[in-house]
Image: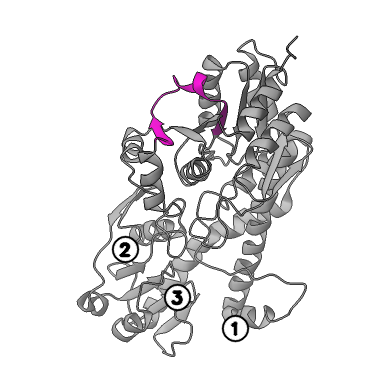
Amino acid sequence: MQPVVNAQQSLVEKIRNRTAIVGVVGLGYVGLPFAVEKAKVGFKVVGIERNPRRAEQVNRGENYIGDVRGEELRELVGQGLIEAVTDFSRVPEMDVIVICVPTPLTKNLTPDLQYVETVTREIARYLRPGQLVSLESTTYPGTTEEVMLPILEGSGLELNRDFFLAHSPERVDPGNKRYTTKNTNKVVGGVGQESLEVAVAFYSQTIENVVPVSSAKAAEMVKVFENTFRAVNIALVNEITLLCDRMGLNVWEVLDAAFTKPFGIMPFYPGPGVGGHCIPLDPHYLEWKAREYNFQTHFIALAGETNRKMPEFTVEKAIRVLNRQGKSVRGAKILLLGMAYKANLDDYRESPAIEVYRLLQNAGAEVLFHDTWTPEVDEHGVRASSVELTDELLRSVDLVIITTNHANVDYQRVVNLAPAVLDTRYATRGIKSEKVVLL
């Protein structure tokens, strides 16, 4: 008599012999690198990407994510190991479904889970026995179990008998050449022990070190804590920057000296604000959830408030630099160097440079920007294109503000030609000139 193989055993066996078909919902900064890593070890990957242009690019082997090697993507697509579709009708083929969709905030800084909920409903329509669903999107503790599980159970299937559910938060650091999807420790939490075991088996196939935790809720808390830790510490150095400005101190000198201490301190740096898909948004998920427990997260609220002040402080300091030249911000010609939120990256989501641009425009300045990494910007009401960084342009402006410290800019040339430079990133480190004002 043949032994009965249950859904969990069958799925784990497929995962271990890499015959499982992997679905990845959302082929962006998280999803596409993840899909490539899975395909590289032999998994067949089907990406669900609602943007038809992106889906077509993937199917042609055209890369659009900096952390993916274009030749690897082309090879994997050519081998039939990666393909992209634009709807959920292929879900029944998939043994593992990984969700990598945005989790934005509303204007009132409350969680907007519309993408997670919509995707989960679509998956529930096609859910079959023997599938693992794993959420990688950053969210508040409880989302996987409280939001996703009821929707999936609406299919009539039973958790940990028919299907399995986990949360494994993404830890992507765009542009980081040292830590990639493969060698970054992977936290995994399941909704129940069976789900945890299946999820650990899956992630262990391509990731060097998997860190199991007791629940999906614990895994969700891990990620929002990581990003809150960064937000609070960035806010601390931003606040020190505001104080040093009042006291006439060079905050960069203070920080450089402080960070020589070999213990008890960790380097964080100020700037014109915080950007990207994590730091400006994710801590507020935890802040919102805490209210359910009648708990006030004071550090998170204060950090968010401080970090949101920095674009305004940057503009205020720009006005001071102009005044020193006897000029008004109204009618001034100002060039921003960099619109990406981070150096040497093409991502401008929530970039503080966009808010600086908008505030200067509202103050009556003529604002231009140069950024070869992000030649077009369209966010929060700012639509603009990069201009060429010519000698004539640098001589013609009243002020240059360095908002992103891209390595492909000759800052010595900028300082030599521009009448004044406000450096919010210390990109002019080592350049001696009275023209330069540091944040």
Residue 253 — which label?
Answer: 1
Q: Secondary structure at mark 1?
A: helix
Q: Earlier in the sequence, mark 3 or mark 1?
A: 1
Query: What is the magenta range?
Result: 80-98
Nearer to us: label 3 or label 2: 2
Q: Secondary structure at mark 3?
A: strand
Q: Secondary structure at mark 2?
A: loop
Instruction: Say which residue appears at 73% left-offset and 12% top-offset.
Output: 2
**Residue linked to disc 2:** 372
Residue 291 visible here: no
Going by the numbered disc 2, the residue's amino acid type is Thr
- x, y percentage for residue 361? 33, 59
Instruction: Say which residue appears at 26% left-offset and 71% top-offset.
Output: 389
Give the CA distance from mark 3 to mark 1: 14 Å
For the residue pair 9 and 104, the one nearer the viewer reads as: 9
Q: Quadrant of residue 98?
A: top right
Give the CA distance from mark 2 to mark 1: 30 Å
